[in-house]
Amino acid sequence: MTPSLDFDVLTIIISQIQLEDPYDYKSLYYCMLVDKKWCEAGIPILWQNPFAFNEISSKYPLSSGRIIEVLLSCFNKEQIKELYEKMQAEFPNFFEAESTKPSLFRRLQTFNKPSFNYPSYIKSLSYRGLFMSTIMWLKSSPYNDHFGDQSSTQIFLKLIIRSLLKLFTSNQMKFRRVIIEGMNDNQMKFKKGIIDGINGMNDESYWWEYYIFSKMLFEQEFKSLFGSIRKLDIEGVDEEQVEEMVNGWKDFSTLKTLKVQINKHLSTIVSNTPFLRKIYINKGDIHFLLPLLASPIPSRTLTSITLHNVKFDKSDQWELLSSLHNLEKLKLIVCWIHPDVDSDARQDMISKVTNIRFKKLKLFVCANENDNGMTIEDESKQLLLQWGVSQHALVVSENFEDSRVRVFHESLERVNLVGVEGVRAKRNLYQNYMKLVKKAQKEQELKKNKTQENSSINTIQHLSEEEDLIARFTH
């Protein structure tokens, strides 16, 4: 009899695949095909973040609509009836006779229920992924042919998304991670290719629907879905949406990681997060943020701070960060100094940072783009890199236009001059760059040993020559 792996062991193996590359769905899918046990162990992992592919790509393949179809197949009879009645009320001409009843309802009423309750496995929600997958499902479905105006398309999409949120609520789901963000330039370009095939949708209606539908997440009806969030990414969300989110969800007590733009509601979120460990700030002036991070609660809990595209000015109170006794990681990504700051004021501002001592700091990253902010030759940045090394931290200097990075560490020779060159890591920065340092250390040790060996050989040869010379004179 062929021995089989324990179920818990299988879960660990498949989870490791997901940890190595969260977007390697093909490998996860192949695991499902091994046998029933592998399938049962892998399905919860495969479905914990079904919309994740939309977080890193501007492309939304037609197959993404398949996710919506699978979720719709998980509706019970009451949910099917409720959706049918609401659509019948909105589109009476479309539902006049049984023969013209949309294939969705004919299938749902006769279709065998899935072997797994897929919605119950979802732990992360990307609103953009949900919205775009619903768009792609509509584009590939027969319903697209029945809508010829903006209003009908908008009503239909809203009904489907609301029904899906109700499905999640009925399964007593609680999302661990939530992403609500805008579209970047690449996604805006690709968006045109999507809406070209959808009746009743144009650029204006697309953005309006994307914006309006997002507000459904903040309704009291769906509040239970967001009561245990550990990671929240609201980068690109405007202040009005953030205000509605704060008023709707209220409780952020379980939040541990926050990614957000600087806005007036940030203090409300941070002051209600007693376990906040990581914060990622994108865009804005830092003078408002520093006192907030130094307040009693975050100063005790924060271990990682990332500042992206943040402006520095001479009035910034950097010395306040000295109260963050547990800070382990500090990243300055494409940050820049206000052009009005002269060289003396810049020096004074940098000295505020370099005078701070973090006992637990283990990673300091300083990344820039060409002609944007501090360059590698800039004396200010060089002082920051040296400061990071003096903190006994792993120091990384990056340039976004280059795939290479330079890593500095006190264990390496000439660390303040050249460092070690390596390939930029996408995740697990500390672990990956420490491997680079350890490799350089081994090479350094081998070089030293070889030098010592050569020195010993030269010494022995020299002594041998002296002995020969003495022997000649003696004879």
Image: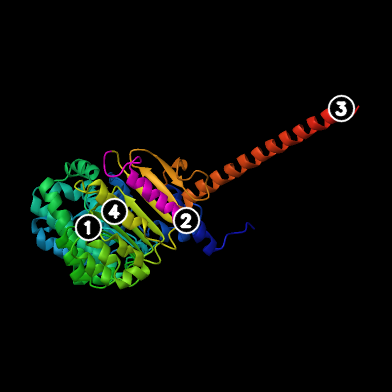
Q: Are marks 2 and 4 in contact (CB under 8 Å)?
A: no
Q: Are marks 4 and 1 in contact (CB under 8 Å)?
A: no
Mark 2 / mark 4, whichever is N-terminal: 4
Mark 2 / mark 3, whichever is N-terminal: 2
Tag 4 residue: 348
Secondary structure under tag 2 reads: loop
Compared to residue 443, the image places residue 246 above or below, namely below
Amino acid at pointer 4: Asp
Amino acid at pointer 2: His
Amino acid at pointer 1: Ser
Q: Nearer the viewer, mark 2 or mark 3?
A: 3
Q: Name which quarter of the figure residue 280 lies in.
A: bottom left
Secondary structure under tag 1 reads: loop
Tag 1 residue: 315
Q: CA distance from mark 1 to mark 3?
A: 80 Å
Residue 253 covered by magenta stretch: no
Tag 2 residue: 392
Amino acid at pointer 3: Phe
Q: Residue at x 16, y 56 (%)?
A: 211
